[in-house]
Image (cartoon, rainbow, N blue to C red):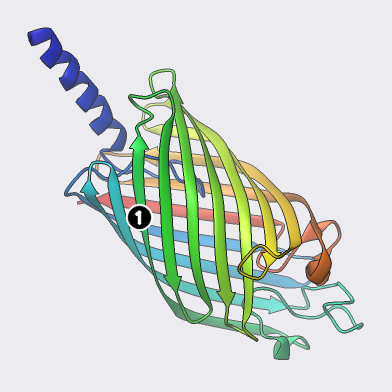
Amino acid sequence: MKAKQWCLAAVMAGVAGSVSAGEGSFGWLYTLDLQPKGTLEFEQKIDLTTAQAAGKYNLWKTKTGLEYGVTNNFQLTGYLNGYSVSANQNYTNSDACGGSPPCTGGFGVPGSAAGGPYSKTQFDGASIEGIWRITNPVTDPVGVGVYGEVTKGTWVDAFEAKLLLQSNFLDDRLVVAANIVAEIEKYKFDESSKESMVDVLYGFTYRFAPKWFAGVEGRFHNDYSGYYFNSHTQRANFIGPNLHYAQKDWWITAAWRYQIGGSCYNDGVAECSGGKVWDSHGKNQFIVKFGAPF
């Protein structure tokens, strides 16, 4: 009996240890390290997309949120969102520029601003997301979970769903994860447009020293016109490193990914030039995340 109790305690300790801080050890990948039941964590995300075909393009996104462990296997998070865009003569595609490149464009830039510099910063509504962990990567060969997020904003309305996969190796020092993502979006910063997206996010991170993780993560991105994945308009690949540091009462993660190539099709051809996809993308994307449980 004592042996059984000890084994159960060890398993529960392993589960709790893996999720005690709800740490986000990747930049953009979601894992199954959730908040324990009844606990809260503050989280701040700052994301920068920069460098398009020419000129200047900086797109900042912020998400300020609270995570709550409803149960040990179900987590809810509420976010307040913000956007800031600054662009000038960043598009070189003749189709996008009405035959007279360069011009100003990209996510957050209305068509009326194509002839000159444009900048705008604003609060942009809220999001609520939920994650249900079906199996735990600490106690099972493969952790499986599902994710859903609803966003209502001034610039964008969206619904996003993800299948979360994670396996831990080497006594949890090595974490391998993947997310399969589907999203529908309504852009409202210019003429209203409906789009859908399918992404595969993948990566690994390794604890190379106490409190420190480092790894690599990538994104295989696909855009479609309409809410129902009607016509394929974009495809792009991104990859880059991540770095994570955690203390008992806080953690921080930084990541960068570089667009190694992309293509545009059908109605999306105006969003490409130089073998890369622009729109809401750039040559470089950076993210910094900070979390503090309380």
Which residue position is annotated with label 1? Answer: 130
Judging depth in this view, the residue of 242 and 107 nearest the camera is 107
Quarter residue 93 falls in: bottom right
Judging depth in this view, the residue of 207 and 183 nearest the camera is 183
Q: Is residue 5 above or below residue 228?
A: above
Quarter residue 201 falls in: top right
Residue 78 x, y percent position in the rendering: 32, 64
Residue 204 x, y percent position in the rendering: 53, 33
Residue 16 x, y percent position in the rendering: 24, 33
Q: Residue at x 48, y 37 (%)?
A: 165
Task: Report if residue 54 is visible in the image.
Answer: no
Q: Residue at x 78, y 78 (%)?
A: 89
Q: Amino acid at mark 1?
A: Gly
| Circle 1: element type | strand
Q: Is residue 201 above or below residue 187?
A: above
Task: Report if residue 129 is visible in the image.
Answer: yes
Local crowd size for mark 1, using a 10 Å CA cut-off: few (<14), some (14–19), many (≥20): some
Q: Residue at x 19, y 49 (%)?
A: 39
Toward the bottom, the furthest residue is 112
101 relative position to 217: left or right: right
Residue 68 x, y percent position in the rendering: 25, 54
Q: Is residue 127 above or below residue 172?
A: below
Q: Quadrant of the N terminus?
A: top left
1 relative position to 140: left or right: left
Toward the right, the furthest residue is 99
Q: Residue at x 50, y 40 (%)?
A: 243
Judging depth in this view, the residue of 294 and 11 nearest the camera is 11
Judging depth in this view, the residue of 134 and 9 nearest the camera is 134
24 relative position to 257: left or right: left
Q: Is residue 178 above or below residue 128?
A: above
